[in-house]
Amino acid sequence: MTKKSAKIRHWLMKSEPDVFSIDELQRLGKTAWEGVRNYTARNSMRDDMKIGDLVIFYHSSVEPAGAVGLARVCSAPYPDPTQFDDKSEYFDPKSTREAPRWILVDVEFVEKWGRMVTLAELKADKALKDMLVVQKGQRLSVQAVADKHFERVLKLAGAKPAEVQG
DNA sequence: GCCAACGTTGGC
DNA sequence: GCCAACGTTGGC
């Protein structure tokens, strides 16, 4: 039985640029996506992300907020080391090394766009009306993005289509 | 800085 | 297992 080649999924990951910006990712090349403490977001990283998946990098809690570039998943899931570090703000005293509660992936820099696609633009675009990030009150920091939405955001950004990324 | 929306916790 | 209280997110 032949197995279909793994489908590339698309994601959106939020970061406050004061904490970790796309410029910082570009400088470092890659990073462990530390500090996620939401089970839905964790489950996406643990269960659904695959190496090679492309990620819209989104700057949140800034004016304006918006999508600023692309990253790529570049590791299998593994325990977030900060949960064991009692000096870290992300320390979780209820987590153990035997049964770690928080799982992350590494992501690598792909590209920074020439301009931010702001949340206002995303909200104004009819083709994106069902995209999770534009829904009122949603605040999930790691979310799946439908292929059509992903391609549309790249188009708004003036970026190359996903098939030729990387 | 405000506060609506939402996720988590814990008492029962 | 319900749900009120609480804490956090994140746009505005």
Image (spheres, coloured by chain):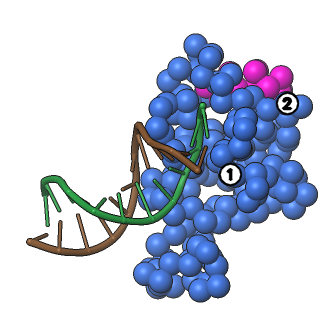
Chain colours: A blue, B brown, C green
C7 up-or-down from C11: above or below: below
**What stretch of residues is rendered in magenta?**
A149-160
| Position of residue A35 measured from the top left corner of the image (x, y, whole percent) | 61, 65
Residue hosting label 2: A115
| Position of residue A143 measured from the top left corner of the image (x, y, whole percent) | 55, 43
On whether residue A6 falls in the magenta region, the answer is no
| Quarter where residue A58 is shown | top right
A1 up-or-down from A74: above or below: above
Residue A33 is left or right of residue B5, and the answer is: right
SS for dot 2:
strand
Q: Residue at x 75, y 21 (%)?
A: A156
Q: Can residue A45 be seen here?
A: yes
| Whole-number angstrom distance, CA of label 1 to CA of label 2 | 17 Å
Q: Residue at x 56, y 56 (%)?
A: A45
| Position of residue A31 measured from the top left corner of the image (x, y, whole percent) | 76, 62
Q: Disc number at residue A123?
A: none
Residue hosting label 1: A15
Q: Can residue A2 be seen here?
A: no
